[in-house]
Amino acid sequence: QKEVEQDPGPLSVPEGAIVSLNCTYSNSAFQYFMWYRQYSRKGPELLMYTYSSGNKEDGRFTAQVDKSSKYISLFIRDSQPSDSATYLCAMTRANGNNRLAFGKGNQVVVIP
Amino acid sequence: NAGVTQTPKFQVLKTGQSMTLQCAQDMNHNSMYWYRQDPGMGLRLIYYSASEGTTDKGEVPNGYNVSRLNKREFSLRLESAAPSQTSVYFCASSEEDRARENIQYFGAGTRLSVL
């Protein structure tokens, strides 16, 4: 079983819809959780970062972490065509070897 | 604010040719990384450098070598390119490899085709 599982999609939604993305993971030592956004032919850029369980909100974006279920989510409210991108989840342990474990990425297309 | 700069942006090689991908960061980060990204495979770590003067293998190091030239620069070399190395290569940097959250910042990538 891969450490981080992410359904690659693609996911197509109409403009204004809520986009829901998620990742599951197997390593209970993961404590830091990130979402990267990657536009076509660009490098990944950090979108949101959360520590341990709970929610974090930044404008139209909300990240949720449920450590008991080993499940993280990203919600995009009022989606815009400019949100069309691939979204990668990433996570790491708190101590020791802190390599980032990435999901494969989920392509999102917001249709005007 | 350049961040992480990769050169070249595109490259086409013939099987057996060699080349070096260059990466430089201006954020005074200690740690640097090389990844490759293939369809359906996600990002896979090739090599990383936790600090100047150190390098370590990642998940897929075979066929590659790296050099941490100084704190700013980390190069990736393909000695004898193979079609299986056709990919998009990303360089990344972070403040500290053992920082708690290890937030990494990525370059724009190098698209490499090996014929």
Image (tube, rainbow, N blue to C red):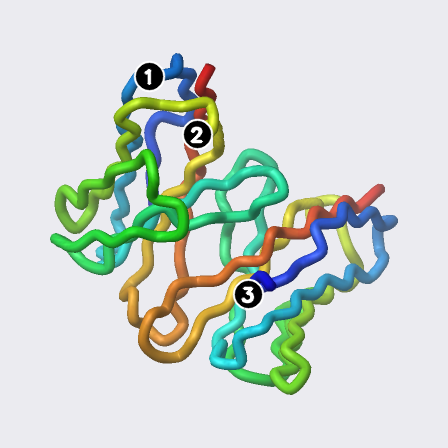
Disc 3 secondary structure class: loop
Q: Pinpoint the chain carrying mark 3.
A: A
Q: What residue is at 29 percent from the left and 39 percent from the top?
A: B23
Q: What residue is at 43 percent from the left and 30 percent from the top?
A: B85
Q: CA distance from mark 1 to mark 3?
A: 34 Å
Q: Amino acid at mark 1?
A: Gly
Quarter of the image that includes the C terminus of chain A:
top right
Q: Nearer the viewer, residue A8 or A59?
A: A8
Residue highlighted by disc 2: B85
Q: What residue is at 54 percent from the left and 38 percent from the top?
A: B38
Q: How many residues crowd around disc 2 within 10 Å: few (fewer than 14), some, or many (20 or more)?
A: some
Disc 1 secondary structure class: loop
Q: Earlier in the sequence, mark 1 or mark 2?
A: 1
For residue A3, which numbered disc appears in the image? 3
Q: What residue is at 63 percent from the left and 78 percent from the top?
A: A70
Q: CA distance from mark 3 to mark 2?
A: 24 Å
Residue A89 falls in which quadrant of the image? bottom right
Residue highlighted by disc 1: B16
Q: Position of residue A42 (x, y in %)?
A: 52, 38
Above or below: residue A83 compared with residue B8: below
Residue A92 falls in which quadrant of the image? bottom left
Q: Position of residue B37 (x, y in %)?
A: 50, 41
Disc 2 secondary structure class: helix
Q: Is residue B105 left or right of residue A69?
A: left
Q: Position of residue B109 (x, y in %)?
A: 43, 36
Q: Amino acid at mark 3?
A: Glu
Above or below: residue A48 compared with residue A15: below
Q: Is residue A34 left or right of residue B46?
A: right
